[in-house]
Amino acid sequence: MRKAFILCLFMMTAVASAQWSNTIDTITTGNFNDIDAQVDHAGMVPGSTNAGMYGYVPGVEWLVFERWSGTGDAISACMFSDSTLKWDSNVVAISPEIVGVLQKYPDICTVGNGTSIAAWQEKAGTVWNIYTSIHATNSAGWSDPTALTNDTVSNTDVEVRPLSDSSLVVIWKRNNAILFSIFKSGSFSGIDTLVASNTVSTEYDFAGNEFVWTDTASSGNRFCLVSPVENAATLTLSAADTITADGDISNPRFMILYGRPGQGFAFNLYKDGRFAAWEASLSPTIGWSTEELAGSATASYLNGVFYVPMQVTSAEPGLPKAAQAYLGGSSAWERVSGTDTSVVFIQAASDSIQEGSDPTMSSLTLAVGGNTYVGFAAWQSDRTGRSRIYSRSFLWKLDAVDEPAGPPTSFRLDQNYPNPFNPTTNIEYRIADFGFVSLKVYDVLGRLVATLVNGARSPGSYGAQFNGSKLASGVYFYRLTAPGVNIVRKMLLEK
């Protein structure tokens, strides 16, 4: 089903929308400090199959983090339950506390065959090395930690990403070079060099069918290099394009654009004493271009971007189907103001702020019914005196997936989402003929509590938002009326 769901973006016009949840979930508790969380990268879109799309997104979502007990740290994880739609409070120790050994900065990924790999860096003595653990399909637990490197120079900044439905790649930095090892058929390949760089500070990201990293000229600011993956089986890169901006570029993060995998990324730009979030996007007609996404007089540090299409529709005539899209959506980044840090959630033109730092975002890995999928942002905050991991989910709904592009031929009233909700929910509907339309909300006694739409509408798809903040918990009904049309659906407000 998910394969068809993704490929439909290439074949037809569709309407999509994203909605952040109204609640913040506390993932970890207890007498620990939990930091450096990473959400599973299962939905990062590889580019070697299905015309650049991921053939199957696994219905598994892990969260991995560093747990500090006060005397030592452990690499720990928990799983998201697709039945309860909550993170499991049972934390698993992937690598337990080891006296005299630092274990830090974990990352994790799952592929379609159910294999998960966690990787992190360990320091024993003065040298950092990369360690991994494997959770195979139907296995009872994680394998014992195994050293992927055993060097006398440090290995740091590890990432784990999918290459295909059954293979993953672990990428890390050794001195100024970027190295990798591919996991396939139950074992790792040898260690190979992805980028041999002379930069002092290397930052990078890999998603879709491209790899991006920062470099430094002999003098001046850092810039970005972005290179398509020529051969996914061996992770061979093609010639790189250079992305520059009027300032110091850092922390590039791919924006996962369904329909255009790997063809856009965001980065920090430091200029005139402040950070701003910028976007680089690739157009088939003009090549790479850059523009500012967000900035202010205070510093903003981009950390965990994930974009989903708010709407997919026809664009310029003659462009490839994959490029015919308007792409906006959801992201999260860290904003620093004085000594305070917060996580900013961006959805279209609105945002909300949650105290915390180091946000990480997943893509859409779990179906929650119909064509609605869920993704996650997670971050750390010490508001309770202990550093905890918190999470917020967002729903992504693809509508009209079974219909070709063109004017609608029937009326329709969709189920609201999220549902249950508190206090806001979205209602989408479709009009086939021009005429007077009303969309009203009633309580269980039939009393009118809100009028969302009351006027003429042309044929097309529309949306409205209902706010129940002043109402009591319970069942409500919403009704769409138009000439010859009367459709009623039920929704649940839970406070």
Image (cartoon, helix red, strand yellow):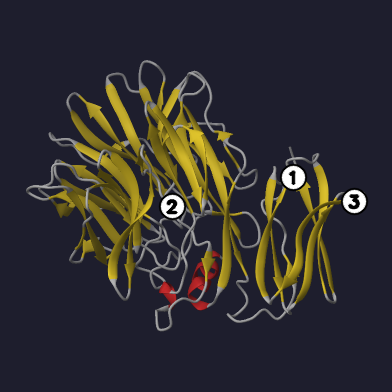
Query: Label 3, label 2: how many angstroms apart (C-alpha)?
Result: 41 Å
- Visible in this render: residue 66? no
Q: How many C-alpha atoms fall within 10 Å of the one at disc 2: few (<14), some, or many (≥20)?
A: many
Residue at the disc numbered 1: 468
Element type at marker 3? loop
| Marks 1 and 2, the one that precedes in the sequence | 2
Q: Which residue is labeled 3 in the image?
A: 447
Q: Position of residue 335 (x, y in %)?
A: 40, 37
Instruction: Give the farthest residue toward the right.
Output: 445
**Amino acid type indicated by mark 3:** Arg
Q: Is residue 199 above or below residue 32?
A: below
Q: Is residue 306 left or right of residue 404?
A: left
- Quadrant assignment, res 69: top left
For image coordinates 38% across by 34% down, the residue present is 336
Q: Amino acid at mark 2?
A: Phe
- Image coordinates for residue 64, horizontal then vertical, percent: 43, 37
The reply to whether residue 215 is visible in this rendering is: yes
The residue singled out by tag 2 in the image is: 306
Q: CA distance from mark 1 to mark 3?
A: 14 Å
**Which tag is nearer the camera, tag 1 or tag 2?**
1
